[in-house]
Image: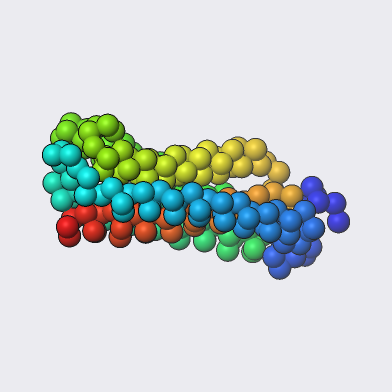
Amino acid sequence: MATNEAVDQHTLPPNPEKATLEGRNKYLGFWFFLGGETVLFASLFGTYLGLRNSTAGGPGGADLFHLDLVFIMTMILLTSSLTSVFAIINMRRNNYKGLLMWMWATVLLGLTFLGFEVYEFYEYYHQGLGFTTSAFASSFYTLVGTHGAHVTFGVLWIITLLVRYRKTGLTLTNAPKFYTAVLYWHFIDVVWVFIFTVVYLLGIGG
């Protein structure tokens, strides 16, 4: 079967994202990529933990963080993981419209999260927490901002796939691409859970 041939209900493999050698190689290569990303965030978390009390007389986490706002952001991002799972379920059922619908829902939730994050940074800045205010500020903005950049990249990645393949239907070529994009989305959601715990809960708890 040609890899760019749309599959129907009768020819759809059980796992179209891994039905070809190219798909399996994408899947394997993506795990190596995530390994590098894990090292990056581990370094940023370690730096933040080492500097979290170095406020230099400026505001710290206990002065700034609001658990209600961060909790809403967390729920939005976790819900986006759920919608991406629904997208993959529809992909495996060869329901391409369902795949597209849930992927667009994931994009919408990702954009909503980013809107809250921009608002959060705007508020912190006007409460005296600039990037160079203290070592705590620099490490906080670097860690949380890097995660926000990853969310932005993930949103653009998914939008690119949705626009590029809006009329092709499900193929053995685009199935691995949607699947790896969803894996990436799960990864940045997991990173946010660590940020929620290490940065915000510890920051509010002191």
Q: Is residue 8 among the parts visible in the rendering? A: no
Res 203 → quadrant: bottom left
Image position, residue 44 (x, y; %): 40, 48
The residue drawn where x is 52% and y is 61% is 85
91 sits to left or right of 147: right
127 sits to left or right of 161: left
Query: How is this picture coloured?
Result: rainbow
The residue drawn where x is 35% and y is 45% is 144
Image position, residue 199 (x, y; %): 29, 53
Res 131 → quadrant: top left
Res 143 → quadrant: top left
Image position, residue 33 (x, y; %): 61, 51
Instruction: Name the one closer to the observer, 42 or 186.
Output: 42
The residue drawn where x is 23% and y is 58% is 202
For residue 102, above or below residue 138: below
22 sits to left or right of 127: right
For residue 18, above or below residue 45: below
Image quadrant containing the N terminus: bottom right
Image position, residue 37 (x, y; %): 53, 50
The residue drawn where x is 25% and y is 49% is 52
